[in-house]
Image (cartoon, grey):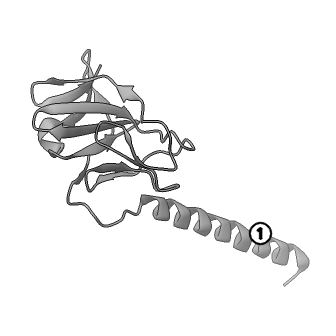
Amino acid sequence: MDNDNRVLDRRTVVAGAGALAAAATALAACGGSGDNATAASAPAPAARSGGPTVLAKTADVPVGGGVIAGDTVVTQPSAGVFVGLDSTCTHAGCRVREVAGGTVNCACHGSKFGLDGSVVAGPAQRPLASRTVRVEGDSVVAG
């Protein structure tokens, strides 16, 4: 094997290791705590042609829980009451990862927020920003 092939092989190995590390990081970011009793996932928001952006079906947002739809968290603190929150944690700007156990949880540093966005456990000091949501038919929509 000449030097040109060895350099190419090293580059291939280094590139492959980098790709493997990136894939492992992406998979780790997708992991959850395993507590899905009050958590539900929603598809990314989709706009109906000419209509508002649908964030979730009302049936998919559990009472006492919520879903994360893109950059919006939709919660239902009590039956029929839907709250929209920004998914950016006010501590360090990470995206909250889950709604479980009656709180909106940020995995970066452990902040927990109530279903109304209030701080339940720090290090965050400020509540999650509100987002305007409303119910249209069987959907929760932005705005």
Q: Nearer the viewer, residue 58 or 99?
A: 99
**Residue 7 image offset from top left, x and y in percent:** 84, 73
Residue 136 vertical placement versus 76 (above, below): above
Q: Is residue 42 visible?
A: no
Looking at the picture, does residue 36 appear above or below residue 143? below
Q: Amino acid at mark 1?
A: Arg
The residue lying at 55 percent from left, 63 percent from top is 25
Kindly indicate the quadrant of the structure image that contains residue 56.
top left
Dot 1 falls on a residue whose secondary structure is: helix
In the rendered image, residue 86, in percent from the top left (x then y), is placed at: 40, 33
Q: Which residue is mark 1?
A: 11
Q: Is residue 15 left or right of residue 75?
A: right
Q: Residue at x 42, y 59 (%)?
A: 30
- At a point 31% along the width and 49% down the height, the residue shown is 103
Q: Residues within 10 Å of mark 1 (few under 14, many from 20)?
A: few
Which residue of the protein is positioned furthest toward the right in this rendering?
A: 3
Answer above or below: position of 73 versus 17: above
For the N terminus, which image quadrant?
bottom right
Q: Note whether residue 58 is visible.
A: yes
Residue at the outermost bottom position:
1
Q: Nearer the viewer, residue 19 or 100?
A: 100
For the point 11% across and 41% down, which residue is it?
A: 59
* Quarter in which the C terminus is drawn: top left
Q: Nearer the viewer, residue 91 or 8?
A: 91
Picture layout, residue 27 above or below residue 76: below
Residue 72: where, in percent of width, then height? 36, 35
User: In the depicted view, which residue is nearer to us: 82 or 114?
Assistant: 114
The spot of residue 5 in percent (x, y) is: 82, 76
